[in-house]
Amino acid sequence: MVLNFAHRGSLTDAPENTLPAFLHALDHGAKAIELDVQLTKDGALVVCHDHTLKRFNPAATKRIKDCTLAEIKQIDIGSTFSEAYQGLTLATLEEVLDLVPPDVLLNIEIKNIPVLYEGIEQRLLDCLKQYNRMETVIISSFDHVALEKVQQLAPDMDLGMLFHYRILRTWDYVRESGLRIRSIHPNQVYVDQNFVQQCKALGYEVYPYTVLSKSRYEELLSYGVDGTFTNLPSIFGQPNA
Ligand code: G3P
Ligand code: CA
């Protein structure tokens, strides 16, 4: 079965990584959703891609790590998308877990670079345990040291290894990392048939990001990927598209 993740929720319908974006993804029929997590100054897990909220509110220049959750919850991140979302704020991970049913697979990306969040791995695992979500989540990161920490803390947790740049023999790097990696998440720009075959020969699932056209999606499917991260509801809305 092909599994396509709604990238940051349905970000064409609502501000990315927010509760309305996740609701829209569910409404489209998504069976898998991707989101990014970071930590506030007081240790709350919040769902956001950038390390500041400037892209959503030009006045919000402080880094998330330097704000308390109470401060974060004062910041409007919806108005720049549309008036309909005026007053919308970042969601906590707990709010997302309350919203998304357990039969929807979540890919939670630890957004650890350039900010390094001390202790985010334990905090995330505690939250997933509390919500009984340890078996229906893939934790991923570009920070492979964070993945190693997750594995030390929770050896059975499914892990996805993200790669932005093209590196030599990615699949060998993954194997030699010694980590129990479920899936490789490469930037889609350099994924070709050989890449997919080499990864799959070693037993890894392959989910390229971020697919923005149906034609590229079809091409990746023809290489044998297990799914993609995509902004297109026409792809993530059909689990076997
Ligand atoms: O997890 C796939 C994708 O989300 C990684 O890139 O920058 O969109 O977080 P980015
Ligand atoms: Ca992400």
Image (tube, helix red, strand yellow):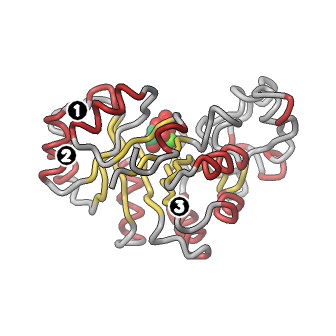
72 to the left or right of 119? right
Q: What residue is disc 1 on?
A: 167
Residue located at (60% from left, 68% from top):
127
Please state the horizontal and vertical placement of residue 62, each as a whole percent of the image. Answer: 73, 34
**Front of the two marks 3 and 2:** 3
Q: What residue is disc 2 on?
A: 173
**Front of the two marks 1 and 3:** 3
Other-residue count near label 3 (Cα within 10 Å), few / some / many at <14 / 14–19 / ≥20: some
Q: Mark 1 or mark 3, which has the lower sequence index?
A: 3
Q: Quadrant of the C terminus?
A: top left
Q: What residue is disc 3 on?
A: 104
Residue located at (87% from left, 39% from top):
87
Tell me the kind of residue under disc 2: Tyr
Whether the residues at callouts 2 and 1 have beta carbons within 8 Å, the answer is: yes
Please state the horizontal and vertical placement of residue 42, each as a whole percent of the image. Answer: 73, 57
Q: Quadrant of the N terminus?
A: bottom left
Tell me the kind of residue under disc 3: Val
Please state the horizontal and vertical placement of residue 107, each as a whole percent of the image. Answer: 48, 54
